[in-house]
Structure formats: C-alpha cells, structure tokens
Image (spheres, rainbow, N blue to C red):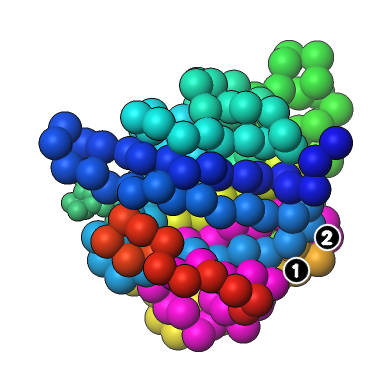
Amino acid sequence: MTDWILEVREINTYYGPIQALKRVSMKAKPGSFVSIIGANGAGKSTFLKTTIGLVKPQSGHILLEGKDITRFSTHKVVKLGVGLVLERRQLFGPLSVLDNLMLGTYRFSRQERKSQVEMSLERVLSLFEILRERSRQKAGTLSGGEQQMLAIGRALMANPKLLLLDEPSLGLAPLFVTQIFETLKELNNQGISVVLVEQIARLALEISDHGYGLATGRIATDGPA
Ligand code: ATP
C-alpha cells in the first residue's frame, strides 16, 4: 500500500526541443485537495496532460495508488478512475447537454454502464440543477459558466476517484468562479481527490490542503495551502 493517490516523480516533458517540464515532482494524498499554481506558460497544462498520458514524459514516473502508469494510454488511466477537465472545456458543441454527459461514461463496460449511468447522472444533475433544466440544449449554446459545469459533470459521469482540472476559472465571471470552486470543495468533501491547476492563487489555495508553485516548468515552491 502507498500513502499517495498520485505521485509524480521527476518528470521531464519536451515538445520537440522545448523542455516544458523540468524534474517536476508532486504528491497527493487520497481525499486531499492539491493546487498547482502558475502563470501563463508555466507548464500547468503540460503537467496534467503528462499525468493523464496525453503527452509522454521523456523521463520520470507517474504513480497512481502506487501503480506505475507512466506509459499507460489515456484511455487506460481514465479506466483506473482518473477524471480530467481540460482547459477551454472541450465539449461537443452541437450535441445536447445530456449527450455530452453520456460521453463521460464510455470508460464503463456495457454491463457496468447499465447500473452506473443512472446513478452517476442523478448525482451530476443534483449537483448542477441548471444542467437538468438544460438537458436538451446544445452544449455550444450554454454560457461559459454552464459549460464549465457540464465539463466537470462529464468527468464525474465516469465516477472518478481522482479529478484533475485545468484552470476551471478561465474566462468566467467572479460569481461563477466562486460557484465552481465551492462545488469542487463539495466534491472533495464527498471523498474525491482533487488536483487543480490554476492561475488564481488565492481562491485555489483557500480550498486546498497543499499547494505547489510552478514557474517556467519547475516546481519553485510547495507547502501547506
Ligand atoms: P496557460 O496558463 O497559458 O495555459 P500553462 O501553464 O498551461 O499555460 P503549457 O500550456 O503547459 O503552460 O505550456 C508550457 C510551455 O510549453 C509553453 O512554453 C508552451 O509554449 C509550450 N507548449 C505547450 N504545448 C506545446 C506544443 N504542443 N508544442 C510546442 N510547445 C508547446
């Protein structure tokens, strides 16, 4: 057994000749809320993409509950219980809210899907009542804040034990940002471990247990939030 739900050990990630992550290490305890704070271009998105297997590190290791997932496909990492909410939300605009949510359930087998879908859907719709009201509306016509809720909802449909989020505050009005952060804290209180990358340090750290500072691809600082 390990004490960490996620452990990243000295990863180096490159885009061609550009080194975007330099010996980055971090750890998250099960049930904890960890934030990684950094400015534009610090490497926040690259960190999450590397963690979930969308980008492969040249060296270093990523462990999920002690299991080395460094070379796993994203599909496999999601199947192991990791949910990712990407920057700029990446929804399917022409599809309905409900269809976008259903896309979050592909990690389940046909057998599992039957029992899981109803439970997950009810959980997401009671967390975001606005999505229930708008379930038939095209995702692309939702407001920015509603789209962010849908993106989080879709990740939750897969019933993740670890949720990774890339700047959920991006482009949102302050009221929506507060709402989204409150929801993330609520999810964390329900037992989901959260790793959040953000530029808005104060708000993110207020709801976190632990924080890391990322600057030009390196962890510059870390400590209790
Ligand atoms: P932002 O807050 O602006 O989204 P970030 O902290 O998420 O920034 P990354 O997107 O991870 O930063 O980018 C880190 C560095 O890697 C930047 O210098 C960026 O230009 C570079 N980079 C990111 N993606 C690619 C890519 N596909 N090809 C080449 N360079 C890239």
Residue 151 position (above or below residue 175)? above
Q: Quadrant of residue 187?
A: bottom right
Give the position of the N terminus as an image quadrant. Answer: top right
In the image, residue 130 lies at what x, y percent?
62, 64
Q: Quadrant of residue 40?
A: bottom left
In the image, residue 43 lies at what x, y percent?
32, 55
Instruction: Give the residue at mark 1.
Output: 186
Whether residue 178 sits left or right of residue 19 in the image: it is: right
Residue 165 position (above or below residue 59)? below
Instruction: Give the residue at mark 2.
Output: 190
Q: Is residue 31 visible?
A: yes
Give the position of the C terminus as an image quadrant. Answer: bottom right
The magenta span reads 190-213
Q: Residue at x 74, y 37 (%)?
A: 65
User: Marks 1/2: CA distance?
Assistant: 6 Å
Report if the CB atoms under discs 1 and 2 are less than 8 Å apart: yes
Identify which residue, 115 or 30, lies in the foreground. Answer: 30
In the image, residue 123 lies at what x, y percent?
78, 51
Q: Quadrant of residue 41?
A: bottom left
Identify which residue, 7 or 154, lies in the foreground. Answer: 7
Q: Residue at x 35, y 29 (%)?
A: 58
Q: Secondary structure at mark 2?
A: loop
Residue type (three-letter) at the residue carrying disc 2: Gln
Specify whether residue 216 is painted magenta. Answer: no
Q: Residue at x 36, y 58 (%)?
A: 218
Q: Is mark 2 within 8 Å of ligand 1?
A: no
Residue most extreme to the left: 17
Q: Residue at x 14, y 36 (%)?
A: 17
Q: Dot 2, how many residues are within 10 Å of its Cα: few (below 14), some (14-19), or many (20+)?
A: few
Residue type (three-letter) at the residue carrying disc 1: Glu
